[in-house]
Amino acid sequence: MISFGIPGGKPCTHLRVNDPLLRTAKIAKVTESKTNSIGMRLLRLQLLDFKNHPEVEMELCAQVNCLLGDNGTGKTNVLDAVHYLGNAKGYFNPIDSQNVRHGQPSFMVEGTFSLDEGDAKEEDRVVCAVIKGQKKVLKRNGKAYQKLADHVGRYPVVMIAPADSALLHDGSEVRRKWMDQVISQYDRPYLDRLIQYHHLVQQRNNLLRYFAENRTFDADQLVPWNEQMVPLAEAIAAQREAFIEEFVPEFQRIHSELCQGKETVGLMLQTRVEQGTFDQALIEAESDDRRLRRSTVGVHKDDVDFRLGDHALKRFGSQGQQKTFLLALRLAQVEHLAQRVGRRPILLLDDIFDKIDAHRAGALMSVLGRARYGQVFISDTDPDRIPQLLKTASVPFKAWWVNDQGVGPHTSEKKAP
């Protein structure tokens, strides 16, 4: 169990190994982060037959955009449209055809991004279109991507939503996916290794199932798969370790701001992939693999443990503490991507205020109003809560009212000076 920044909330400069079966301290060197971020913001957003919205056109605020309205009116769907532009997929439903408005054959999401780097300014037009029964098309400035993976990280977007509770309560796959998505946005070789590794695991599992179904077993046939998996797994594990080591100090700092230093947090990477010995671990696991018909060791079994002080957050954290932890985690993700990608991500906050008290909400608004954060979109059912918090924090914003008739300007607004 590899730990960073636990107990007492002090950043660790070393690794603690609590389980002799888990890997010893061997961290890959963290590469230099990018310090200069390109100013990025979404100027305009257009939707056509996306989810419940027939047609939407919005001229956006460069800092904070508030989406206000009752439940079920489509506030979250507007946020998800922005997520599509950044990630080429929806946050809530990965099946593109199910995001087409009922009774319609297709949807289109279009956004115009402004990119500022010193005196150089440019605008990029991104269009994502889905026609039922056809392949999704993603275009940048009129040119379609051959591989959607080439779009990853170009316009980084981070979503914070109630569904993030799955990071705490669901299985390890959800936490691995979070970690992999963050790293993949700035490290294409990592993404390529990950795709290749999972393909090999799938093929190895197919072979194990073949053995079971035919009541036979030949360890020699596993060797080619093992030999290809080992270098990929060791590289992935090293990159994950480096990510956690680099990520935790910023995460702790942001969490301390949100809770006024009253709580301490940490992350623990759990892995059994040890440099130089993973090939032997695969051989030793053959008996279990044969019995269970699947590969039981490897980076596809890694996990990230969320800690509150000396305890597991999932078991001992209150709802407010859990929500603050997840907020800090996502805000640290924004900071990390800004440093690595060189562009400050757009931050999407969906209905996050229900389980945090007024003090934490005010602290969050103050944090978001600082220059280090880029453009923010926030949804809420209360028409006054967020506008009042933003006014108190002197944060420029534009408010939108969402109802059955569509999306239009709200009367509460604070313009930038």
Image (tube, rainbow, N blue to C red):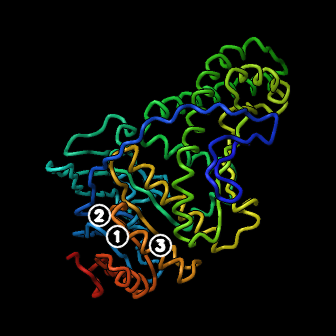
Q: Which residue is at 46% across, 35% downward?
A: 31
Left or right of 249? Residue 267 is right
Query: Is 44 or 275 nearer to us in this picture?
Result: 275
Res 57 seen here: no
Please say if the residues under marks 2 and 3 sit with CB atoms less than 8 Å apart: no
* Percent of width and height locating residue 22: 76, 35
User: Label 3, label 1: how many angstroms apart (C-alpha)?
Assistant: 30 Å
Q: Residue furthest top?
A: 220
In the figure, 322 relative to 278: above or below?
below
Query: Where is mark 1, residue-wise?
Result: 53
Query: Where is mark 3, residue-wise?
Result: 364
Element carrying mark 2 = strand
In the figure, 226 relative to 307: above or below?
above
Sequence-first tag of 3 and 1 = 1
Query: Where is mark 2, residue-wise?
Result: 47
Please say if the residues under marks 1 and 2 sit with CB atoms less than 8 Å apart: yes
Query: Is 237 or 192 nearer to us in this picture?
Result: 237
Give the residue type that dot 3 points to. Answer: Leu
In the figure, 243 relative to 127: above or below?
above
Q: Which quadrant would residue 73 be assigned to in this image?
A: bottom left
User: Mark 3 or mark 1: which is in front?
Assistant: 3
User: Label 1, label 2: how many angstroms apart (C-alpha)?
Assistant: 7 Å
Q: Which quadrant would residue 403 be assigned to in this image?
A: bottom left
Sequence-first tag of 1 and 2 = 2
Element carrying mark 1 = strand
Q: Quadrant of the N terminus?
A: top right
Element carrying mark 3 = helix
Give the residue type that dot 1 points to. Answer: His
